[in-house]
Amino acid sequence: MIYFAILAHKNEEILKRQIENIQYFNPESKVVLYNGGTDKRFGNSLNINICPYSRPLKYGNLVPFMIDVMKWVEETGVTYDYFVNLDHDVLFIKHGFESFLDKMMSGYDCMGPHFLIHNTPFDYPDFGPSITMWREWQRWQPFFKTDYFARFFNPGQIYKPGIVKRMLEGVNRNRLEALLSSTEVFALEEMFFPTLAMTEGAKIRGYPWNFEQSLEFVRHLGNITKDEVRKAREQPFYYWIHPIKEEKLEEMSQWILELES
């Protein structure tokens, strides 16, 4: 069973369409919402779990989203096979994601898109978030106790329950909150979780994607087009797309259902 955590803070109707899309293509899954905004009533009409630790988040530092949901999931004793984080601009495009995870995650604790390991500032000198991490590495290195940090693209990170438990047990929350309150590392969540998992002994891998090809279907900017969805549906390892934002998400989710029928 997949436990999906969604980060969102506005437009319940579009979020409703996203949740319907997730549940259609992953019928055995469960969904929890993390309300990252200031409207405490957001999501109340959707009949899904809302993480009680939700709090307003700052763009570029979404670490509290995943760590708060992981904490809540552990406290509630939910049974699951895979913990998966999603942004508000992700859509599924075909069935089979859980079977894909069963195959790809055999022998692994976690998996994420666009997996990289940064050993020196010269490894990926054009990657903006890593530049900001190297600027603060003297503060984060004692926290991780490593000579490197890892990176996943943010949405679609996968963690098994065993590594979730070890990550939570290994984190000094007071120290982490102090670091989070003052950090200027951009997209910290992309580096924090895979690095923390590796420090806790995780066996880790990336999605089985060719990087250049994957940017047609999973990227930072530019809404995914219908032609790209058609192409992604024909590929063996692509089950979701990113980004597809706001009204475009509502339109695309309906169009994908029409393709299914």
Image (tube, grey):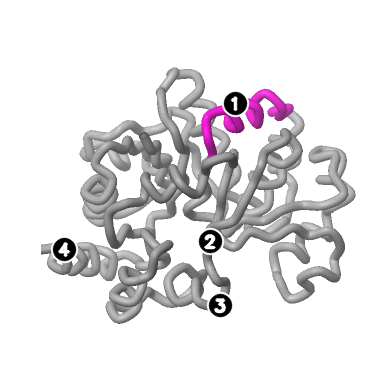
Magenta region, mostly helix, strand or loop?
Answer: helix
Identify which residue is drawn at 63% across, 57% down. Answer: 187
Say which label, 1 or 3, has the lower sequence index.
1
Which residue in the protein does label 2 denote? 208
| Of labels 1 and 3, the one closer to you | 3
Q: Quadrant of residue 82?
A: top left
Mark 4 belongs to which amino acid?
Glu
Residue lying furthest bottom: 227
Q: Quadrant of residue 163?
A: top right
- Mark yes or no: residue 204 visible: yes
193 left or right of 161 in image: right
Q: Secondary structure at mark 2?
A: loop
Q: Magenta span has 164?
A: yes
Q: Secondary structure at mark 3?
A: helix
Which residue in the protein does label 1 denote? 165
Which residue in the protein does label 3 denote? 212
> Where are the magenta residues, as a range?
159-173
Report how far apart the C-alphas of labels 4 and 1 lie in the structure. 37 Å
Q: Magenta span has 207?
A: no
Identify which residue is drawn at 52% across, 49% down. Answer: 157
Numbered marks: total: 4
Mark 2 belongs to which amino acid?
Pro
99 left or right of 123 in image: left
Report how far apart the C-alphas of labels 4 and 2 lie in the structure. 25 Å
Residue 260: which disc?
4
Image quarter in which the N terminus is found:
top left
Report how far apart the C-alphas of labels 1 and 3 lie in the structure. 34 Å
In the image shown, does 72 or 112 lie closer to the viewer?
112
Mark 3 belongs to which amino acid?
Glu
In x, y percent, where is residue 259?
16, 68
Q: Are marks 3 and 2 in contact (CB under 8 Å)?
A: no
| Of labels 2 and 1, the one closer to you | 2
